[in-house]
Amino acid sequence: MCKVLDIPRSTYYKFLDKTPSKRAIENQKYESEILAIYKKSSERYGAPKIHNILTNQGFNISIKRVQRLMKKLNIASVVVKQFRPYSSKSEIVERKNILRRDFRTKTINEKWVGDITYIHTIKNGWCYLASVMDLHTRKIVGYSFAKTMDTNLIITALRNAYETQRPNGSLIFHSDLGAQYTSEAFIEQLKRYNITASYSGKGCPYDNACIESFHSILKKEEVNRVIYYDFAAARLALFKYIEGWYNRQRIHGSIGYLTPQAKEDLAKASNL
């Protein structure tokens, strides 16, 4: 056969005895671990989070290697473009911005941020989610989902946050200048809870970047990947995502690759 193919016998036998290199064997193991983490996250995690989990599990692997192997496996963090149905054209009156993009905190229940986003359903059309986030933990401490975008929507979200967290110190609540957040009813609710109101500047989404980021993640990882038949189906999916995934399983680079719930537990333990 070697004569027919015109190749040296040494080359032929070297080919027969060829075994995978140590690096190739390592890559096979890493690929299996990467796929398992990726699937467990419902295809939501990208290279940084997968790399963090692998290193926490004791694997000595660089993030560049994780990126290369993910490219080889043809997998990536889900990216689905967010859609805004319309923008408000109502007149906006400037309010005091106490937060001033200072998202730093020392413990829980110092600074909360809130916002509203749109969720589409086939049967009920546009529905609305109001969320409240604690900046210390990035946890969604309260939310409300409804078929109408009125003041009751955000009051309910605030009430849920307050009853869950029971803040007992100085607390700031920051939002945009939407009509719901600047309404008399909402401002009165803040006063009853002894919460100080703070507002983004006109046309300044970066003033409320953290909650804007959460809603963007929500759309990318959950909402824009599926079609909800009705309000009830969307409400159940949002509950599973926020309470089952985001707060308790999804790790965040901004809080040291902890979950929001783990970050809150640490804060409560340090306050004892």
Image (spheres, rainbow, N blue to C red):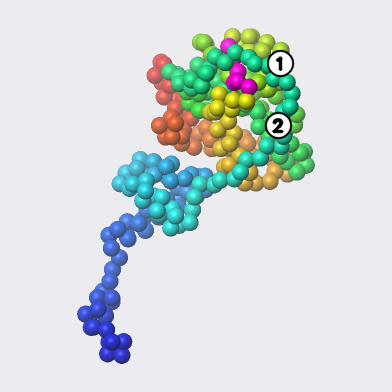
Q: Residue at x 39, y 19 (%)?
A: 270
Give how far across and how far down residue 45 sits, in percent: 48, 44
Q: Residue furthest bottom?
A: 4
Quarter of image, res 212? top right
Vertical placement of residue 229 versus 154, above or below: below
In the rendered image, the quadrant that contains the C terminus is top left
Q: Magenta region, mostly helix, strand or loop?
A: strand
Left/right of residue 234 with respect to residue 124 in the rendered view: left
Residue 213 x %, y %: 55, 33
Q: Secondary structure at mark 2?
A: loop
Are the two marked residues, 2 and 1, in contact with CB atoms closer than 8 angstroms? no
Three-letter residue code for mark 1 = Ser
Q: Is residue 218 magenta?
A: no
Pick the residue in front: 36 or 272.
36
Q: Which residue is mark 2?
A: 87
Where does the magenta region start and end?
195-202
Left or right: 246, with 50 as reference point: right
Q: Which residue is mark 1?
A: 183
**Residue 95: percent from the left, percent from the top?**
63, 14
